[in-house]
Image (cartoon, rainbow, N blue to C red):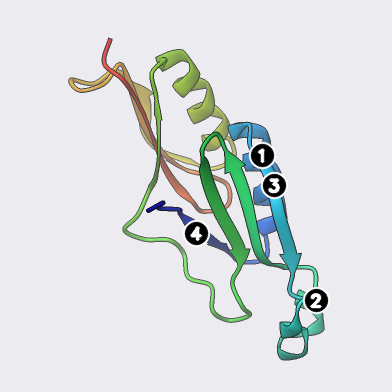
């Protein structure tokens, strides 16, 4: 079994994919728009360039993303995407990049369980936790 997060966006999936590709060092391996799919006739023409489905490979993990259908987007609640690092310096760098233009809920710092931990919501509204192994 493989467990993969699936993130929904409100028309910003293309920008989010580019951002995550850069910040996380991933590679987009699939991307299809609503307009290039059999669903095109069921969505407004202004959403044809929105992403119906995409995959971003990051190491051995796959992050899947899409733009929600019109009027169906909901802000993520009750979840966080967690990134784990052995090196606190690397984790802090990723945390700083993810939080840029977003919101920091817990500044990156050492904790009793971790050499570095922080919580943020990125500029696309996705909540993240960055956790680093204890030194």
* N-term mark: 2 or 1: 1
Instruction: Determine the residue positioned at 23% across, 21% down.
Output: 111
Looking at the image, is mark 1 or mark 4 earlier in the sequence?
4
Q: Distance between the residues labelled 4 and 2?
A: 20 Å
Instruction: Give the mark nearest the N terminus, 2 or 3.
Output: 3
The label number, if any, that marks residue 28 in the structure image: 3
Rounded to the nearest whole Å, what is the CA distance between mark 2 and mark 3? Answer: 19 Å
Residue at mark 2 to residue at mark 1: CA–CA distance: 23 Å
User: Is mark 3 in CB contact (under 8 Å) with mark 1?
Assistant: yes
Residue 75: give x, y in percent of width and height: 46, 64
Report helix, strand or loop for mark 2.
loop
Element at label 3:
strand
N-term mark: 3 or 4: 4
Question: Badge 4 is on which residue?
Answer: 6
| Viewer-nearest residue: 122 or 7 | 7
Q: What is the residue that sits farthest to the top in this orientation? A: 135
Q: In this view, does 52 lie to the left or right of 88?
A: right
Crowding at dot 2, Cα within 10 Å, few <14 / some 14-19 / many 20+, comes out as many
Distance of mark 3 from mark 1, alpha carbons? 7 Å
Label 2: which residue? Answer: 35
């Amino acid at each position: 079994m493989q467990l993969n997060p699936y993130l929904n966006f409100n028309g910003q999936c293309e920008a989010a994919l580019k951002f995550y590709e850069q910040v996380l060092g991933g590679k987009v391996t699939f991307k299809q728009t609503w307009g290039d799919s059999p669903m095109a006739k069921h969505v407004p023409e202004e959403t044809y360039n929105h992403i119906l489905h995409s995959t971003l490979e990051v190491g051995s993990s796959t992050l899947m993303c899409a733009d929600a259908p019109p009027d169906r987007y909901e802000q993520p609640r009750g979840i966080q995407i967690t990134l784990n690092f052995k090196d606190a310096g690397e984790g802090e760098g990723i945390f700083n990049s993810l939080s840029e233009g977003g919101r920091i809920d817990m500044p990156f710092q050492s904790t009793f369980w971790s050499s570095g931990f922080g919580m943020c919501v990125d500029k696309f509204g996705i909540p993240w936790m960055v956790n680093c192994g204890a030194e």
